[in-house]
Image: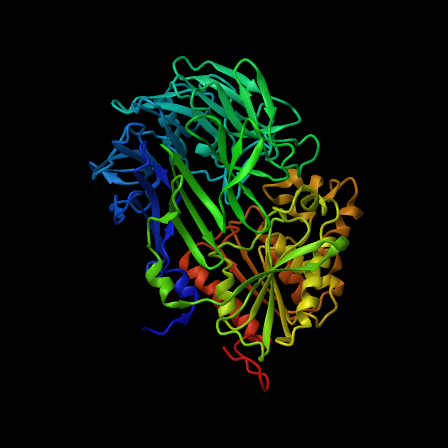
Amino acid sequence: MARKKPISVDDLWQLERLGSPSLSPDGAQAVCTLSRYSMAENKASTSLCLLSTLGGQPRALTHCGDKDTQPAFSPQGDRIGFTARREQQGRKDEETQFYVIGADGGEAQRVGEVATGIDAFRWCPDGRRIVFVSWVWPELKGVKAQAKALREHKARLATGYVTDQAFYRYWDHFVPMGRVPHLHVMDIATGRVRDLFEGSDVELSRGEPDAQCFDISPDGRKAVFACDPAVRKRSDGRFALAEVDLRNGRITPIAHDADWDFGSPRYSPDGSSVAFVASHQGLKHTMPNQLALWVRGDGHQVLSAEWDRSVHGPLLWDDEGRSVLLAAEERGRRHLWRFDLATRQAELAVRGGWVQGWDLRAGTLVTLADAADHPGRLHVHRPGQAPRRIEHVNDRVMAGLRLGRVEETSVRGALGDPVQVWLFYPPGFDEGKQYPLLQVIHGGPHTSVGDNWHYRWNHPVFAAQGQVVAVVNYHGSSGFGHAFLDSITHRWGELELQDIEAATTVLLRKPWVDRSRVYAAGGSYGGFMVAWMNGHVKPGRYAAYLCHAGCFDWTAMFADDAWAWHAKELGTWYWDDPARVQARSAHAFAGQMHTPTLVVHGALDYRVPDAQGLAYYNTLQARGIETRLLWFPDENHWVLKPRNSQLWYTEFFAWLRKFGGPARRSGRGQVRS
């Protein structure tokens, strides 16, 4: 038997990444994306993979495209639709287009040609049409006018972006200038396209609208969608639901409440109802997503108000229309739940790890889920049968790797509450030796981590360097009830720091922790926490920090794409009460900072603009504190390119080693990686 080795960043990029499954109408087959990464070419390729839920080997369905995505079986099960940019019949796609391929394989065919491209789509029940999202100039009419405007826009020599909108950029890109996302319908046989919103002021979300934001009725006559009725769109807009008639384009509002935000609508099997998620934003911006139901002719109501969980889509009805499948987090895991509409009770359908995707057809359920000790896997679930895995794409790589033990524990944190802590031990952990301790602080802040597999911040890879990794789901984290999540509102940094420090204190009592080699690293809000700690924790407790895409100055952060939430989280706008905002801002405590820090940022990060990281780095430099900067001109809030990720991990581990990290032997009985 070949000897296993500790997992490394290079191993991480050898793993293939499965996408969410789409099932055939009879539930016998599933199609998903499969992404492979080349370190040599520094890029990814994504193709479609066909799997049987009855048994047999998966097979590649497409080979020619670099990025074939969003596969979905037609309602008749004979074809699979997907989006791609390809070269076909002498024409290379300038924008993403719609393609179809036979369910038994063959050559994929482009359907029509949409000048403004296709962002997301759904099949109509007759299989003869699709409804899709495309960004258009709302004042223009007809596909020819849209194509002409796009040609003129691309031919212009001026490069300036001009807008008067409040919502004009998102994540790592600017909203297409002068354009908004509309629903369209395409005839598959002819490729003919019609804009369903043409002549109206209705549009979809400007924040990357996908196939979750609309649905098509079972009779194929209407589409339900989420839209912001406000005249001036903002990133914190409260969405309503409306229906559009696919024949004449008539739009009818069906569910609207100025205090609520609605989304992810799904028609019931008989078309009489729409399940959707609803959040009472008028009460508080941290209110959870709840399951709601609109009944034709009878209005809407919230169903899960007594269930202290936040609902995540996509929502899926069972075949009888009696229950809805949905995801919800619970204590560092993400499970799939079945919510019974009659009893208003949720029962566990599939336990995480972290359930990432799912589809249900003809009584067959397929899920994509990962866990702390393995990347995403696909399983089929049938009533009365044990779950059965239907792919083994990463088994060969994983079989040669040695992962350390993972432990879920808790400490007494802020307000006397129990706070969850995940511990990742290095392979071959020996309690008789001493190890460095790395605190990894998650972002959000209203997210959680734990029993999941992360490619950008992979805890087993961190631990395999020869250190114990601690991850705290501090106050503010999701999956522990609304009160726990909301507890940090208007007092960022306070409770979270108490929780992290409580975990560090408990772990420092362990004989296997080397007190001189303790570090903390965080990204996004976790990066803010690292900067906050630098100004609030006694120097010397942590030997070094890593701050990735961290928030540093809450006033300057107003340049981000999520500025509309600042006052909600901090309690005020910076011009109304500058002292209150400054009291929560890491930069205000620069005079107390002493700990060496590696600062990482990407120039395409609009969630936390890179000026935040540069200001933090410059501040530490000005104070004479040992600092190193890793800046990427081509990355956003995340580091996504293989070579850049390799560099990220390399710099991170070298920074820890510089301050006595896991590669150093510092005395008798201490570990050397």
Query: 512 left or right of 5?
Result: right
Q: Residue at x 58, y 84 (%)?
A: 669
Nearest the viewer among 640 and 323 is 323
Q: Quadrant of the N terminus?
A: bottom left
Query: 275 left or right of 132?
Result: right
Residue 180 visible from this viewpoint: no
Name above or below for residue 373 compared with residue 131: below
Query: 532 left or right of 200?
Result: right
Query: 197 left or right of 550?
Result: left
Q: Whole-percent x and y of residue 586?
A: 71, 56
Q: Whole-percent x and y of residue 337?
A: 51, 39
Nearest the viewer among 174 and 418 is 418
Residue 588 falls in which quadrant of the image?
A: bottom right
Q: Whole-percent x and y of residue 560?
A: 60, 44
Name above or below for residue 51 compared with residue 408: above
Residue 587 falls in which quadrant of the image?
A: bottom right
Q: Residue at x 48, y 37 (%)?
A: 208
Colour option used? rainbow
Nearest the viewer among 618 and 344 is 344
Name above or below for residue 204 compared with residue 374: above
Residue 251 visible from this viewpoint: yes
The residue positioned farthest toward the front in the image shown? 384
